[in-house]
Amino acid sequence: MIRYQTVSKTFPTGGGVRDLTLEIPTGKITALVGPSGSGKSTALKLVNGLLAPSDGTLCIQGIPQKEWNPIELRRSVGYVPQNGALFPHMTVLENVTLPQEILLGASNPRISQAKNLPEKRFRRATHALKQVELDSTEFGNRYPHQLSGGQKQRVAVARTLVTDPKIILLDEPFSALDPLTRKRMQILLTKLHKELGFTSIVVTHDVAEAFAVADYAAVMDRGRLVESGDLQSLANNPQSAYLQELLAHTQQQSQHLQTELGEP
Ligand code: ADP
Ligand code: MG
């Protein structure tokens, strides 16, 4: 489904991704973890065509990224960017409908047209909001600043669903949310995944989050893949210093929490 074969993406200023060889299991959620600046966002943006490989081949559904029609690629690959990135001057329904306007062959993709949504697109957007458990009557005409952090991320997820993508990429989607909202979003993501069966890559720094949503994980450091595989096996026998530290930190945190709660 998604196969990186010695893929590099270099920037004139350094950084990027080096020699990445990785197969993302089809129909599963893969957690992509690594310290800040390790190339995680770059690796994601290569999949939906926001960036092109400088070297190597990245195949998406068997077709090299460079051979994909860019519109077709965006339609097949849903993307929730690092900050959700809703358009502040557009309502929830307009935000959610936008990919259909742009990617599904609208005759006039002007944003103003979204005020008179064609019936079919309106229905699809309403359905997408329902899929993320938001009532379109209540939320459809609100602007992003009238939503909570969790609701904004729900809208960002709904926006990816309207083109029925086979692949959904999420870049630290829930990291700014409070723990309970975060938990609810993780449950929502796994529920959607069970229903729709897409292939997904979720960038996260949180081992608990990785375990909550993913079966498989890849660890990056300084632009390179350091280890990948079944998440449980990686956690049982971490090879990289980064993953060892991350696991130790998570354990410390949960012990701290248990002490605070007075549990054994
Ligand atoms: P991560 O998401 O793991 O924090 P990124 O993929 O965003 O890391 O960035 C990896 C490295 O590539 C960083 O050192 C960053 O400065 C560099 N980089 C990322 N995008 C660009 C860009 N568009 N132009 C120049 N350098 C970039
Ligand atoms: Mg990033």
Image: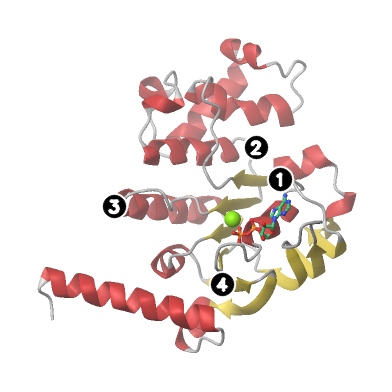
| Residue at which label 1 appears | 76
Question: In the rendered view of the protein, which quadrant contains the C terminus?
Answer: bottom left
Q: Amino acid at mark 2?
A: Thr
Closer to the eye: label 3 or 2: 3
Picture coordinates of residue 40 (x, y %)? 63, 61
> For the residue labelled by badge 4, is the local secondary structure a helix, a strand or a loop?
strand
Task: Please tell me which residue is depicted at 56% across the width and 27% down the height of the picture.
Answer: 87
Quadrant position of ligand 1: bottom right
Q: Amino acid at mark 3?
A: Leu
> For the residue labelled by badge 3, is the local secondary structure a helix, a strand or a loop?
helix
Q: Does 104 appear above or below 26?
A: above
Of all residues shown, which one is farthest toward the left? Answer: 262
| Residue at which label 4 appears | 217
Q: Amino acid at mark 1?
A: Ser
Closer to the eye: label 2 or 4: 4
> Disc 2 to disc 4, how far (Cα)?
26 Å
| Residue at which label 2 appears | 163
Mark toward the start of the polypeptide (1 vs 3): 1
In contact (CB < 8 Å): disc 2 and disc 1: yes
| Residue at which label 3 appears | 180
Question: In the rendered view of the protein, which quadrant contains the N terminus?
Answer: bottom right
> Disc 1 to disc 3, how far (Cα)?
31 Å
Picture coordinates of residue 144 (x, y %)? 45, 27
Picture coordinates of residue 34 (x, y %)? 56, 69
In contact (CB < 8 Å): disc 4 and disc 1: no
